[in-house]
Image: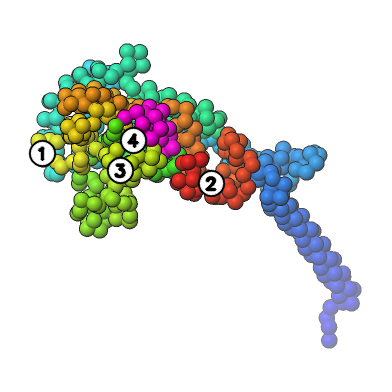
Amino acid sequence: MSLVAPGTVLMAGAVAKRRKSRRHSQVASSSRRAEKTVGARAAVVMRAEEPRKNGRGAAEVAAEMRNGKNGKNGKTEEPLDLGLGPELVVKVPPYDRRKVGVLLLNIGTPASTEVGDVRDYLEKFLADDRVIEIEPPFLKWLVLQFLLLVRPKSSAVNYRKIWDPVRGSPLLFHSLDLAKGLQEEMGDRFEVRIGMQYSSPTVDESLKDLAESGVDSVVLIPMFPHYASGTTGSCLAGAYRTAAELYCTPFLSVLPPFYGHRLYVAAMKKRISETIGERGKNVDHILFSFHGVPEEQCSRTDATKSFCNKSASCCSMLQKENRNCYRAQCFETARLLAYELGLEDGRWSIGFQSRLTLRGTIEWIKPYTDEGFVELAKKGVKKLAVVAPSFTADCVETLEELGITGREDFEAAGGEELVVIPCLNSSEHWVKNLAQIVREHIAETARDPIDAIQTSRARQPGFEEMEEDSLQTAAQSNFQQAARG
């Protein structure tokens, strides 16, 4: 028998019915809001996919959406509301329009030709364990003290011979000129700086300057076509240390050694041909002179320990075991240049310069450039051209060691004329080619290589007519086709 009054039962039923109705209403309202949000998000995705059909970039469509414009007819729309409120307000440039830093890395130069400044520079340079690898540390310290007693004075004399009375160090002003040309060629989206390992402006200063300019992503470009621990390795190690110490660590990418890149080889070919004529017709012989390094630095790049420096022909071709060997990369550059220049066998040779013998305690890679000058003269070569492909900017090693001392050695041995081919420096052709090398590097490391290449094609004549398939293969084109083109 129920003890609940009939009226109470009716009231309870009515209340339950109203509650159920409200729940249905709330669910329906939530469902409509969810459908609206999902639909809006789907519209974003669909409009982001639109560019592939009408040729516009995703960034362009996104910018139109942020500005409240319809991408098709230009009519003003209400701002897109995803229900997230002010969190969607964009207060920084869109990701694909933020500035990219380009940092040209090099070893450095003395501040002046005074012995004290030269000594300060050499102390930093020679103390680097990647430059001179001597164990134990105490022995390295003794060797360094000896070098700092005898080298600064003679080096200062050499620097005075090549120092520009107005602009100073050739390496420094050529680097600054290259950075300026590269900035103009690449446009406002990039911030180009130089960074020296052992002198000002240092890598540390330049990275901090880029950060203060609002740059978060930086492309590091070691200005050495070939990898060596004492050059590329040292510069990159310094840049990594600096980046790690910054609170907002920059996002770094590194341009790999470009010793065989078609655009570098094409720039070198043009430079050489401009100086000594097509196919080197104005000289008897061409000597490709590369900076020397200790043999140990080459051997240590061979992980197998069974290939590098184990035979006289170990550098006859590049392969897995010697892919990072400095000497093997130099030989590859010389072969490519000789082929592109159309030089017959016997009309070109290779040498390595700037060795620091330390009284025979360290073996340096061979053959030696200075000995090559004498041998070629004695073989009857009267007019010799020398080019230094491992240097992208003229410096004391090219201007004094080759251009002054080398000329004296060659003529003393019976030669008549030594033609020193200038480095690439900031020549117009090199500026354009280096800019394209950087663009290709960025394209290859981007999420969507096609979009990345398209952002640069406006500055590249002929790119407007290229189809997507051509763009996809532009960064990977065959060396011979691109260099000849």
**What's the mark number on residue 360?**
1
Q: Amino acid at mark 1?
A: Gly
**Which residue has dot 2 on it?**
474
For the point 81% across and 39% down, the residue is: 75
| Mark 3 Cα shell of 10 Å, populated few (<14), some (14-19), many (≥20) | few
Secondary structure beneath label 3: loop
| Mark 1 Cα shell of 10 Å, populated few (<14), some (14-19), many (≥20) | few
**Which residue has dot 4 on it?**
389
For the point 47% across and 25% down, the residue is: 180
Q: Amino acid at mark 4?
A: Pro
Q: Quadrant of residue 142?
A: top left
407 sits left or right of 478 in the view: left
Q: Amino acid at mark 2?
A: Ala
Question: What secondary structure predominates along the stretch shown in magenta?
Answer: helix
Instruction: Please tell me which residue lies in front, 413 or 57.
Output: 413
For the point 80% across and 62% down, the residue is: 28
Secondary structure beneath label 4: loop
For the point 53% across and 46% down, the residue is: 474
